[in-house]
Image (cartoon, rainbow, N blue to C red):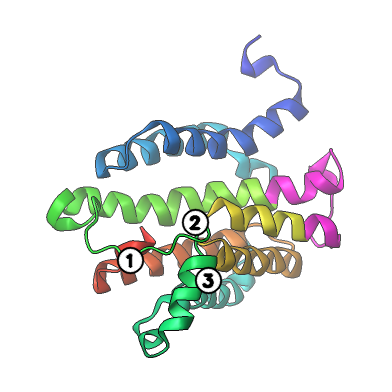
């Protein structure tokens, strides 16, 4: 049976889930190189554009843009804050975070000083592919999966019928937990998931957390490039 003849509910599920699953699979199957990341981003972007999950949602509401930008900036600050050089004056705090706030736990690692994504190693074309893949591809894919699909699916299997502003505590915090565990920095990942989830409930507009997530990832990428903070990539 071709995808075009699948029942509509099945196709809706596919359109929300497939790009995210493809991203995770390619992350495991491909090596950690700049070329592999560019391939992963290109493949998943192509699948995302073919699935077009945004067709199930209203157009973006410009009035939500200021709040989305603010949340995006705030999440970026929260993501970076525990690893800023200022904590070097309190080595116990830095050590605690690296042991417990970054997976795998109990295995503190030294900051990364070299990266396959650095311009000196990969060249600026592949470095920019890393930046744009993070900011424009996976940020949107994740929001359609986590907030658009999973949170509402936990409430009701016919998830598109769930009011975007409906809050169900166990579903909200389970989504936050799983979103955090998707990232190596699980602790700040949970904070990010809570912020994006709150924004979705507050605005009832999935484009708001998408915008916030894009802003977070783009600013984080700029910080990585400007400061050489390759740990975040």
Apparent side of residue 166 relative to residue 34 in the rendered image (left or right): right
Apparent side of residue 211 relative to residue 114 in the rendered image (left or right): right
Q: Depth check: give the residue in front, 194 or 214.
A: 194
Assign a secondary structure to mark 3: helix
Q: CA distance from mark 1 to mark 2?
A: 15 Å
Label 3 sits on residue: 72
Identify the disc placed on residue 153. Answer: none
Q: Position of residue 73 (x, y in %)?
A: 49, 76
Q: CA distance from mark 3 to mark 1?
A: 28 Å
Identify the disc placed on residue 110. Answer: 1
User: Dot 1: within a 10 Å radius of its alpha carbon, few (fewer than 14), some, or many (20 or more) residues?
Assistant: few
Closer to the N terminus: mark 2 or mark 3?
3
Closer to the N terminus: mark 3 or mark 1?
3
Residue drawn at the location 33% of the way across and 56% of the way down: 131
Apparent side of residue 49 relative to residue 157 in the rendered image (left or right): left
Q: Depth check: give the residue in front, 216 or 62.
A: 216
Q: Is residue 58 visible?
A: no
Label 2 sits on residue: 184
User: Dot 3: within a 10 Å radius of its alpha carbon, few (fewer than 14), some, or many (20 or more) residues?
Assistant: many
Q: Position of residue 47 (x, y in %)?
A: 49, 32
Assign a secondary structure to mark 1: loop
Q: Quadrant of residue 21?
A: top right
Per the rendered image, the range of residues in magenta is 148-172
The residue sitting at the top extreme is 1
Q: Depth check: give the residue in front, 183 or 149.
A: 183
Q: Is residue 215 visible?
A: yes
Characterize the magenta stretch by its predominant secondary structure. Answer: helix
Residue drawn at the location 58% of the way across and 71% of the way down: 68
């Amino acid at each position: 049976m071709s995808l075009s003849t699948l029942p509509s509910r099945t196709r809706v599920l596919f359109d929300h889930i497939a790009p995210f699953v493809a991203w995770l699979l390619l992350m495991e199957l491909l090596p950690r190189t700049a070329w592999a990341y560019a391939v992963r981003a290109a493949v998943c972007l192509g699948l995302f554009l073919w699935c077009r999950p945004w067709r199930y949602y209203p157009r973006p509401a410009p009035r939500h843009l200021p709040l989305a930008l603010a949340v995006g900036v705030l999440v970026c600050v929260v993501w970076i804050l525990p690893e800023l050089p200022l904590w070097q004056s309190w080595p116990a705090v830095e050590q605690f975070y690296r042991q417990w706030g970054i997976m795998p736990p109990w295995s503190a690692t030294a900051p990364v000083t070299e990266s396959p994504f650095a311009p000196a190693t990969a060249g600026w074309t592949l470095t920019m592919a890393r930046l744009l893949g993070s900011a424009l591809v996976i940020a949107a894919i994740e929001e359609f999966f986590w907030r658009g699909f999973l949170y509402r699916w936990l409430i009701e299997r016919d998830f598109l019928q769930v009011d975007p502003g409906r809050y169900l505590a166990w579903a909200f915090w389970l989504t936050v937990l799983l979103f955090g565990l998707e990232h190596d920095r699980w602790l700040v990942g949970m904070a990010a998931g809570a912020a994006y989830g709150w924004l979705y409930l507050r605005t009832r507009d999935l484009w708001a957390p998408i915008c916030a997530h894009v802003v977070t990832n783009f600013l984080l990428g700029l910080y990585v490039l400007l400061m050489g903070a390759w740990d975040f990539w």
